């Protein structure tokens, strides 16, 4: 114990005496943290300027994943060509999109892929075992197209009055057991094909009355503890390896009024502490109105990391910035120098990401 304490004191003294050493350490941490950035782009085929920008970032190790939105997937040839180009440059890169089924299926029937039933319809017509086979076919197409991170399934409760989840039938049911059974079948199917799944939207978006794409959604009054049940069930069953928090405010869980994305009490104390979650946490898109309209990008990124997120999703589409990864690295470096982030904190996230990456391939 004494030796360890001396090493710690010596390290701290060295940092104070030699600020250049501290800066070099911060730069190294920032360089490693590049693997935490999941970035979107503008372009719908491999020959666009946006694809060239992403290719350059991948070649130089500046990002760990690429996010595909609807505007990136306008043809089968374009989407698969982009995935192939990016995968050739970095075989370990995460290539992510939303492939829930129903209204949220980027690789859609219009492009020649097999339509996936919306969650609510599927749960009414199929058993979890039958659903697993339905999802297994979808997962094969997903993997064959070149993707390995599905921003799904939804573990929110189904409430017809909800305009974001319920209206579109994105929820499997109203009780944790049912939701976990079908979401677990979804995860099993996609993991069997080498894809990871992001369970969303923690701690529950299903009874909300707003859309976080447009602004903050306050669930303080509409939310109940029962909405944690699907997430708890999936964690206990060993199905939860990646969880996405929502841009949701719950003043009972975090009196500061910070959205879940930026809330250490919710992500660290509730999810990791009380619920015992040990997997990775991914933000929802920091370019969504709920975050973009209230926080500068730099602050949103740093606060997301401080809160306990491991993967930072930025669609980079509201105001496309070719140099976003370089800025991301600089923001992390500055946060380390300022003492807001530690090297150990970044390393914990990188370890979780590597564990997650081991589930692909």
Image: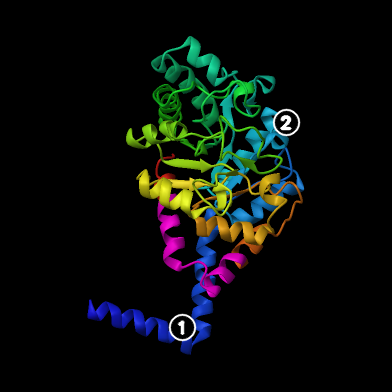
Which residue: 73% across, 51% down? Answer: 293
Vertical position of residue 254 compared to residue 26: above or below: above
Cα–Cα span, label 1 and label 2: 51 Å
From this viewpoint, which residue is outermost toward the bottom?
Answer: 17
| Residue 237 located left or right of residue 82 | left
The percent coordinates of residue 231 (x first, y second) are 42, 35
Question: Mark 1 — residue?
Answer: 15
Mark found first going from the N terminus, 1 or 2: 1
Residue stretch in magenta: 331-353
Q: Please say whether residue 44 is one of the residues in the magenta stretch.
A: no
Q: Which residue is mark 2?
A: 74
> Which secondary structure is most common in the magenta stretch?
helix
Quadrant of the image containing the C terminus: top left
**Structural crowding at the residue carrying mark 2, measured as other residues with C-alpha within 10 Å and reported as few (<14), some (14–19) or many (≥20):** some
Q: Residue at x 67, y 35 (%)?
A: 211
> What element does badge 1 sit on?
helix
Q: Can the viewer see residue 2?
A: yes
């Amino acid at each position: 114990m004494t030796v360890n304490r001396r090493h710690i004191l010596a390290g701290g003294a060295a940092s104070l005496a030699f600020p250049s050493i501290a800066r070099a350490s911060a730069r190294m941490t920032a360089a490693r943290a590049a693997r935490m950035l999941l970035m979107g782009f503008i372009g719908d085929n491999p020959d666009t300027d946006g694809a060239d920008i992403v290719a350059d970032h991948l070649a130089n190790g500046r990002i760990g994943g690429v996010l595909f939105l609807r505007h990136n997937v306008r043809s089968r040839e374009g989407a698969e060509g982009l995935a192939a180009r990016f995968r050739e440059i970095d075989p370990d890169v995460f290539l992510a999109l939303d492939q829930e089924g129903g209204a949220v299926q980027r690789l859609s029937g219009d492009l020649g892929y097999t339509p996936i039933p919306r969650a609510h319809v599927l749960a009414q017509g199929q058993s979890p075992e039958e659903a697993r086979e339905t999802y297994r076919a979808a997962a094969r197409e997903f993997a064959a197209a070149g993707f390995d991170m599905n921003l799904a399934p939804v573990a929110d409760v189904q409430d017809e009055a909800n305009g974001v989840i319920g209206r579109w039938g994105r929820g499997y049911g109203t009780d944790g057991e049912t939701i976990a059974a079908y979401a677990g079948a979804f995860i099993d199917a996609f993991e069997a094909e080498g894809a990871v799944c992001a369970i969303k939207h923690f701690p529950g978006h299903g009874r909300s009355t707003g859309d976080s794409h447009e602004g903050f959604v306050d669930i303080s009054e509409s939310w109940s503890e029962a909405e944690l049940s699907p997430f708890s069930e999936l964690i206990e069953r060993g199905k939860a390896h990646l969880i996405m928090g929502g841009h949701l405010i719950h003043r009972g869980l975090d009196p500061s009024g910070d959205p879940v994305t930026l809330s250490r009490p919710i992500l660290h104390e509730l999810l990791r502490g009380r619920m015992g979650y040990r997997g990775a946490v991914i933000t929802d898109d920091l370019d969504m109105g709920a975050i973009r309209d209230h926080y500068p990008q730099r602050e949103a990124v740093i606060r997301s990391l401080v809160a306990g997120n491991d993967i930072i999703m930025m669609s980079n589409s509201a105001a496309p910035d070719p140099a976003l990864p370089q800025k991301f690295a600089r923001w992390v470096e500055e946060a380390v120098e300022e003492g807001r982030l530690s090297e150990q904190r970044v390393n914990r996230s990188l370890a979780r990401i590597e564990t997650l990456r081991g589930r692909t391939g």
